[in-house]
Image (tube, rainbow, N blue to C red):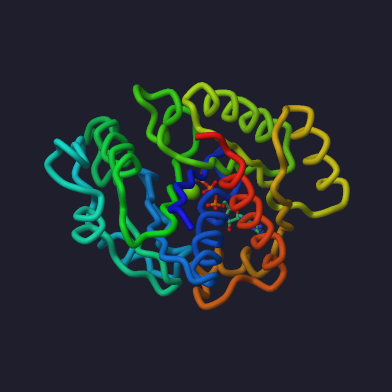
Amino acid sequence: MPSIRLGIVGKGGVGKTTVAGLVARAFVERGRTVVAIDTDSNPNLGLSLGLTLAQTEAIPVLPRSIIVGSGGSTTAERLVADYGRPTPAGPTLLSAIRVAEAGAGCTCGGHATVRGMLSDALSGVDVVLVDMEAGLEHLSRSGGTLAYADVLLVVCEPTRKSVLTATRTAALAEELGIPRTLAVGNKAQSAEDVEFFTATLNEGGLSLATVLPFDQQVARADRAGSVDATAIPAGLVGAVDQILDAVADAMSTAVQ
Ligand SMILES: Nc1ncnc2c1ncn2[C@@H]1O[C@H](COP(=O)(O)OP(=O)(O)OP(=O)(O)O)[C@@H](O)[C@H]1O
Ligand SMILES: [Mg+2]
């Protein structure tokens, strides 16, 4: 199986980090080696992968504006070895952009490093997954952080605004040359919500990989500030499997 570079995007608060954690863990359960990169300036993917807040904050931040790969000063493999940290859920976690102090400057350099990492071969890794900060800037930034992604997962909740963001994202992704974008509906609480996703996303030309229900176990874990990294919540297993199947399907049909 070739390595998959997966970007997880969407409007603020829709569940990108939650979905990134679930998908990363599900790939590990299928026997894949996973590297997860957190590009949020307020990183919390570590929590979704079973780390404590202190452990998440102790992960060293990737150097900014590094040229990765041939002709560069380092390789993606070297960066994973030096900056990656193991997580209870299985994936190796990297932190690309952490803003620790006010006025620390723009984060473009961190995004450039991530783009370089995605462009470089990473032997022994099956899946590289990038949890993006909310917004569309990373798709329009010069070169685009996710320019080398194979598949984009755009997460939405059952609101018109998040679907609109998803549609705009898909258009930018196409311009950037990302071969395939899949929508993931999240936090559905009724058949009406599922119908909303199906109707609006299809209308927007997006293919819907699955709909994840609003899950009490996820909500409780969030409030408690600790995620059980040993298993995917029972109510979400089927939908998460559908995401992995849709990604595999996209990889086999996407034109490179
Ligand atoms: N399927 C779900 N069921 C219940 N709660 C959920 C679900 N998905 C996400 N949430 C909750 O929604 C909130 C936002 O989720 P999350 O942090 O994953 O979103 P995000 O898109 O990464 O946010 P941000 O834009 O701030 O990075 C969290 O409180 C999370 O626990
Ligand atoms: Mg997030």
Residue extending furthest toward the bottom: 230
Residue 232, position as x, y percentages in the image: 60, 71
Residue extending furthest toward the left: 73
Task: Answer above or below: position of 234 versus 122.
Answer: below
Task: Answer above or below: position of 158 versus 21.
Answer: above
Residue 220, position as x, y percentages in the image: 61, 68
Point 54% across, 70% down: residue: 30
The answer to whether residue 226 shows anywhere in this view is no
Q: Nearer the viewer, residue 129 or 30?
A: 30
Residue 106 located left or right of residue 241: left
Task: Answer above or below: position of 81 versus 194.
Answer: below
Point 42% across, 61% down: residue: 34
The answer to whether residue 5 shows anywhere in this view is yes
Task: Answer above or below: position of 68 versus 106.
Answer: below
Point 55% across, 56% down: residue: 18
Q: Nearer the viewer, residue 12 or 239?
A: 239
Quarter of the figure with residue 235: bottom right
Residue 227, position as x, y percentages in the image: 51, 70
Quarter of the figure with residue 221: bottom right
Point 42% across, 36% down: residue: 146
Residue 46, position as x, y percentages in the image: 40, 62
Q: Nearer the viewer, residue 90 or 156?
A: 90
Q: How many marks?
A: 0
